[in-house]
Every structure is written in C-alpha cells, then in structure tokens.
Image (cartoon, helix red, strand yellow):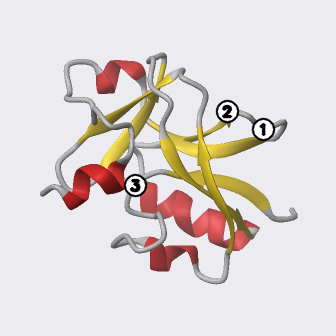
Amino acid sequence: MSDVILFVYGTLRPGESQAWRLGDSQPLGPATTTPEYTLIDLGPYPAMAPGGHQAVVGDLVSVSARTLADLDEFEGALYHRAEITLSGRDTRALAYLVTPSFASGRPAVASSDWTTRARRK
C-alpha cells in the first residue's frame, strides 16, 4: 500500500499534543472540509462526525501504511477511518470520524477549528 492523504483536525495537527504520532509523514498544508460535518468538543480532544453543517479546519498529511496502522490503533474503537470531501480541492482524503449518534447532544466547536478552541482554554 502506498502513502495516503490524511486530514487531521485535532490533537494530530502540527503543534498539537499528539502530532508526534505522524512520525515522518509529509505535511501537505492546511485544508477545510466541505460543510457536511460537525466538530465536537470531547474535552481534551475533538471528534468529527458526518451529517453536520460545519466546514472543519485541519491539515493534510501524507502518511505511510505503517503510520496509518499505528494511528488506527491509537484512535481505537471510538473512531473509524473514512473518506471525506474537501472544500476547493479535487482530491479526497481519509479522516477519523465518529458516528452521528455518538456526536448527538455533545457540544460543537463553534469555530470549526480545534486549534482556535484550544488556545482559548
């Protein structure tokens, strides 16, 4: 399996607490999803769910199959990896999502940008 493009939106983003887990992945720059998601606040980290109306802000990285397998283990049973749609790009990316039912009733990150939310704490 060759490298894949991953959209990171929370603690895996550059400068955040879990960014080190990306290892030698190659940064591809900032990106925003189409407004079809919700970024929810789980306290120390966020989750993104499909079926919302937010354009979530994040970053794209090119990750190896090995790094992706390590991230799958780290993200555990709460998240599942799925293909998402990006705004203004012909390419799609993978991201770690939660189910809409898990997100239901949880607070959304109003700015759609976890790093903005985290700086205000």
Tag in front: 1 or 3: 1
Residue 85, image quadrant: top right
Residue assigned mark 1: 89
Residue drawn at point x = 42 percent, y = 36 percent:
48
96 horizontally vs 100: left or right: right
Alpha-carbon span between mark 1 and mark 2: 6 Å
Residue drawn at point x = 33 percent, y = 73 percent:
17
Quarter of the image that includes the C terminus? bottom left
Q: Secondary structure at mark 2?
A: loop
Label 1 environment density (alpha carbons within 10 Å; few <14, some 14–19, many ≥20): few
Alpha-carbon span between mark 3 and mark 2: 18 Å
Residue drawn at point x = 22 percent, y = 60 percent:
119
56 horizontally vs 27: left or right: left
Q: Position of residue 98 (x, y in %)?
A: 42, 34
The answer to whether mark 1 and mark 3 are in CB contact below 8 A is: no
**1 or 3: tag closer to the N-terminus:** 3
Give, as a three-letter code, the residue at label 1: Arg
Label 2 environment density (alpha carbons within 10 Å; few <14, some 14–19, many ≥20): some
Q: Nearer the viewer, residue 37 or 73?
A: 37
Q: Which mark is residue 87?
A: 2
Residue drawn at point x = 44 percent, y = 29 percent:
49
Q: Which mark is residue 39?
A: none
Residue assigned mark 3: 10
Q: Is residue 79 above or below residue 21?
A: above
Give, as a three-letter code, the residue at label 3: Gly
The answer to whether mark 1 and mark 2 are in CB contact below 8 A is: yes
Quarter of the image that includes the N terminus? bottom right
Q: Nearer the viewer, residue 87 or 79?
A: 87
Q: Is residue 73 above or below residue 48?
A: below
